[in-house]
Amino acid sequence: MRVDDSYFKGRGAQLKTSNKYLKSEYVEMHVEGLDEPLLENPSTQIFFENPKKIINKIESPDLAGMFSLNPYQGCEHGCIYCYARNTHEYYGFSAGLDFESKIIVKKNAPEILEQQLMSKNWNAAPIMLSGNTDCYQPQEKKLEITRKILQVFGKYRHPVSLITKNSLIERDIDVLSDLAKDNLVHVMISITTLNEELRRKMEPRTASSLKRLKTVEALANANIPVGIMNAPLIPGLNHHEIPEVLKAAADHGALTAGMTIVRLNGSIGKIFEDWLQKNFPDRFEKVWNQICSMHEGNVNDSQFGRRMRGDGNVADAIHQLFRVSKKKYFSGREMPAYDLTKFRKGGTLSLF
């Protein structure tokens, strides 16, 4: 890893990418003419938003029929590969440093959720927390928006799923246990690597791999259905860890495991390329070319059905390794089905 004064420790992205939605911006075109660095390691800033609705229908055929809810936009975890980075450009920010330092908070999310669940037109369907950014990122410890959202789901006995990289979810085991009693919750813990050196570079402000495994164990011991997402899988960086990650997850009580192949759409390609060159110059060409080989010569892929699976020999080898490992360590295990009949349509008044 390159270590010098210009590397922003604790951040994933090391640059501020251009935003196609902005007419003008600052650039380092002539560095020799600058009296001071144009970019510095930014402190985290919080912006508040008051949305009128909070449940989003997922239109992607890859996740047909699902709904998502995101109490935060932007994410301090700073995962270098995160597909959600591009959405920050809609707010006038960059997908690079801005994404992990300018956090948009939807403080009224629990109230808006309750209004939508009480609508006579709403029918119970699992809603995914963290479809875009992590609902247990650092600001959640203070703001407790996700906890309040889970309490709303519990009040109306509505199904919910969560995915996170943060052990902070253990704080809410009491609420999750209540939901689990009626088969109303699924939890997925994202474990990308067990290599702590790689994790610190690739996901700088996330819980350690060991802490995530301990979180899987804590949830399983509380009878909360929990699995892991071994994603994204990046050839030359973490794909070889698949058997080790799945075995560790199964040993700690996980019921299932999922995966996706890395794809670098929009500004993420430039962000990841810069990060890879600075941290792994010795294997840059190998990793970059193998990523391209999985997406018909490109690092980006928007074709439904293929974009998260990849294509070609490298992708096929990764999928085969994952299938064999999952069969070995998760045979006979599965997540319980949601019980949609528990939903109190129209609110608690429907009980009377």
Image (cartoon, grey):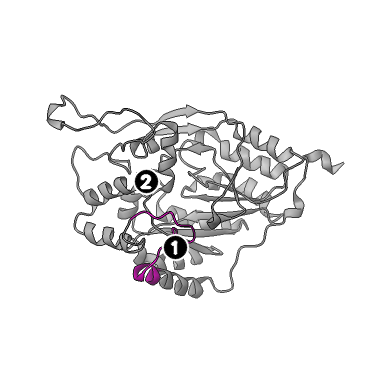
Q: Are marks 1 and 2 in contact (CB under 8 Å)?
A: no
**Which residue appears at 74% of the width and 42% of the height?**
121
Name, please, the residue furthest toward the right. Answer: 352
Q: Is residue 341 visible?
A: yes
| Quarter-of-image position of residue 311 | bottom left
Any magenta on residue 302?
yes
Q: Depth check: 150 or 47 in front?
A: 47
Side of 18 where 155 appears, left or right: right
Q: Disc 1 vs disc 2: which is toward the camera?
A: 2
- Name the element at disc 1: loop
The type of residue carrying mark 1 is Arg
Mark 1 or mark 2, which has the lower sequence index?
2
Q: Above or below — where is 257 with respect to 182? A: below
Q: For the residue carrying disc 1, how many other residues have a C-alpha within 10 Å: few (<14), some (14-19), or many (20+)?
A: some
Q: What residue sits right under mark 1 in the picture?
A: 309
Could you say whether the residue bearing mark 2 is in a helix, strand or loop? Answer: loop
Looking at the picture, how far across and down is residue 128, in whole percent? 58, 49
The amino acid on which the numbered mark 2 sits, given as a three-letter code, is Gly
Q: Is 116 a magenta residue?
A: no
Q: What is the x, y in percent for residue 39?
A: 25, 31
Q: Nearer the viewer, residue 54 or 327?
A: 54
Quick check: 114 left or right of 134? right
The segment highlighted magenta reads: 299-318
Q: Nearer the viewer, residue 119 or 60?
A: 60
Q: Which residue is mark 2?
A: 266
Q: Give the image location of residue 31, x and y in percent.
A: 15, 32
